[in-house]
Every structure is written in structure tokens, then in C-alpha cells.
Amino acid sequence: MMFGWLKHYMPRSLYGRALLILLLPVLTLQLVISISFVQRHFEGVTRQMTRSVALELNFLVSEVAAAPSVAQARARAEALGAPLELDVVLPAEVDPSVHNRVFYDLAGGFVTESLAAEVPALLDVALLGTRGVRVWLEVPQGSMEVSFSRQRVSASNPHQLIVLMIVLGALLTVISFFFLRNQLRPIKRMAAAATAFGKGRMVPFSPSGAAEVRIAGTAFLDMRARIERQTQQRTMMLSGVSHDLRTPLTRMRLGLSMLDDAEAGPLKRDVDEMQRLLDGFLDFARGDAGDDVQPVDVAGLVTGIVEECQRVGQPVSLGAVTGTADPVPLRDMAVRRAVENLIGNALRYGTQALVSLQIGERSVRITVEDDGPGIPEEQREEAVKPFARLDPSRNQDLGSGVGLGLAIVSDVARAHGGMLRLGQSARLGGLQADLVLAR
């Protein structure tokens, strides 16, 4: 793209881009008007007014130069200067110390240039601020000092227009900013509601603002309602299937209990496997249903899970726990189920599991490592999909179920606005699973 390089310099936020769209035309307009005003008004008008004064100065020089004596020249200069509004001093010395041109006097340079070009007898020009001009002219009787009002050679206070433009531009920009903020507020509210919904929280939201924003807000509400309805229907359907299948499984288990162990052993294992599959389906379908978001002590939650595993003799150890101790809003049961699945997955394919926790300002990371065979990098994306079976990398004979363990953990992570990352453990050499939850 021709202007692709501009993307690196463009603001990333909607506020920044809106302000850029708002300020750029205003500044461009002010710059164009300012240049045009300086060119036409400051230069053109000032030179024209200065040329008229230059004619009077040339006339004064010619009349004074014709006087036979200094006294007559002084009298003639005073007599001509009064009706021309010129203060004349003859003779006078050039005094450079009276130069007092202020920095905002944009027309002063044009006055000096015009007088130098139009008055041959000019010796020096001194600008007395923005209120007066003093010139020294060369006549046969010596140097003649002439003072006159600045208003005769330039418009009074010419900088006021630019100051007015800047002040009004800033005022209108501030007013536009508040108006723009009100227009962007519904978009930010919708973004906050979408972010909260991505983290598993339902935030009250009602469409407002412009018509297009209302349409987008209504579409978001419809989408959120459909997702919630589909989730509930999936949970209710599989819960019903699970409930309906539990009854015949129970009857089969009771019937098998009446048979000899030699004959019923393989069938009992099949029934137990069916029970595990059924429980896995239900866990995957249920997700975090019925679990409300509430502040949770994540460090206490993880420590409690590790202690429960150690209490039943499982080789699970607790690693480093770092970060703040502030409660984190999340779904307690869902996170507990995800961590237990990771630990069970680690013990199924390894001989030990190491659990560590890092609580940051914007996210929580729960890491579970094992010393098993791990998962090859090219298969890690496939491993988190439902019903994925990664044989022979992770042996199916170990009772790996139907491949829903990591899928359940990934769903829990996405429900909290996070993700599940799989890698290789640097400490134990096996799989490292990072459960990242957004705060």
C-alpha cells in the first residue's frame, strides 16, 4: 500500500484517531488562512499604507532641503509636520538604542523594507513597539528625526486575528471533544460488555447513541442471547442424556455384581469406562454453567488443590507462588475443574506433577508441569480440540479417556478471557501447560 507506512504513526485508540480527524482539518484551515492573511493583509496593506507615508516624508525632505538656513529649515519642517501628523526634530542624532520591535510584530519587517525602498534619504528606522515609528532622514542641514503613529503604516493590532483564530479554534476543539466523547461512550460500553462476556461475566448493557451504534449494540445483545441459549440447551441436552444413561448403567452394574468375578471383570471395566466417558461428556458440556463469577483467592485455591492431591498420596508438589494476594474475579468451580484436569493429565502420563502460580496485574497464570513424554509442537494445537487422541505420543493404554481433558481446560480459559498454552517443561522435561486467565 502506498500509505502503509502511516499506520505506524497513527493513534491506536478510537479517541486518538477521532481527535486526529477532528484536529487535522481545523489546524490545516487555520494554517492556510493565517498564511493567506499574512500575505495579503500584513504585507499588501502594510506596504500600501507605508507608501503613502513615504510620499509625505519625501515631500518633507524636499521642502526642508530647499531652506537656505537651519533655522528656516526647522521652521519649515515644523510647519509642514503639524498638518501631516509628523513630529520633526532638526537637527537630530541617530539613536539605535530606541529600537523596540516586539516578537509578535508581524508587519514591522514590511514597514522597514517599504520605507527603505521608497525614501532615498532614509538613514535608519526604529519601531517603537506597536505604537510608533521613528525615522532619521538625511537633509543638507544634517540629520532630521521624524516620528509618527504606527497606525499610519500598518493595521492596528494585526496579531489579534491570529490570536482570535487560535483561541476560537481551541474552544471549538474542546467543545467538539466533549461531543465526540459522548458519541464514543456507547461504543466503549459495548466493548466493555463484550470483553466481560468473553470472560464469562454478564454485564448489563442497553444500546444507546447514534443509530449505527444502536444497531451494533442490538446485534451484540442478540448474539449474546443466542450464545447463552445454545450453551444452556447443550448443557440441558447432555445432562438429560447423562441422566438417562446412568439408570441402565446402574442396572448393568448391579447385574454384573451377581456374576463371577472372572466372567464379569471385563464387563465391569467396560461399564466403568462408559461411566468415565459419560462424566467427561457432561463436564465438557457443562463448562462453567451454574458457576457465578466472584472474587477468589487464587493462591488459596491452587494451594488447596495441591494439598488435596497430596492427602490422597498423589505425587503433586507446589512450586513458586508469586504476585499480589488480592482476590481475582473468576468462576471458582470451573477453574478448580480445569486445574484438576491438568494435574490428572500430568499424572496419567508422568510420575510427578509440579504446580506453580503467577498473579499479575492483568492476568493469572497457573502452570502444571510433568515428567512425561510431552506433546510434539506440531500436535499441540490439535491436542486442545475435543475428542483429540494423540497416539502414540501419549499412550492410549494409560486410560486417556476420550480426549476432552485439555478441551475442557481450554474452554475454561476462553470463558475467562484467557488461553491454554502448551509447551515443554524446562524443569521436568515433560509437558508444561499454562492456564492463563484474564483479570
Image (cartoon, grey):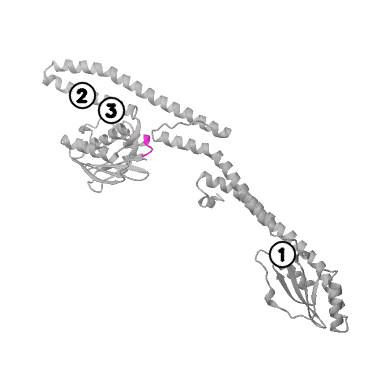
**Left or right for 139, reference 301:** right
| Residue for point 67% across, 70% down | 100
Rendered location of residue 368, percent (x, y) = 26, 41
- The first of marks 1 and 3 along the sequence is 1
Amino acid on which disc 2 is placed: Asp
Residue 380 at x, y percent in the picture: 32, 40
Residue 45 figure quarter: bottom right
Residue range in magenta is: 414-418
In the rendering, which numbered label is found on residue 280? Answer: 3
User: Label for residue 272?
Assistant: 2
Provide the residue designation for mark 1.
107
Numbered disc 3: secondary structure: helix
Q: Residue 149 appears at what percent x and percent y?
A: 76, 67
- The vertical placement of 137 against 35, above or below, is below
The residue under the point 25% across, 35% down is 340
Q: Is residue 51 above or below residue 276?
A: below
Q: Main secondary structure of the magenta part?
A: loop
Q: Amino acid at mark 1?
A: Ala
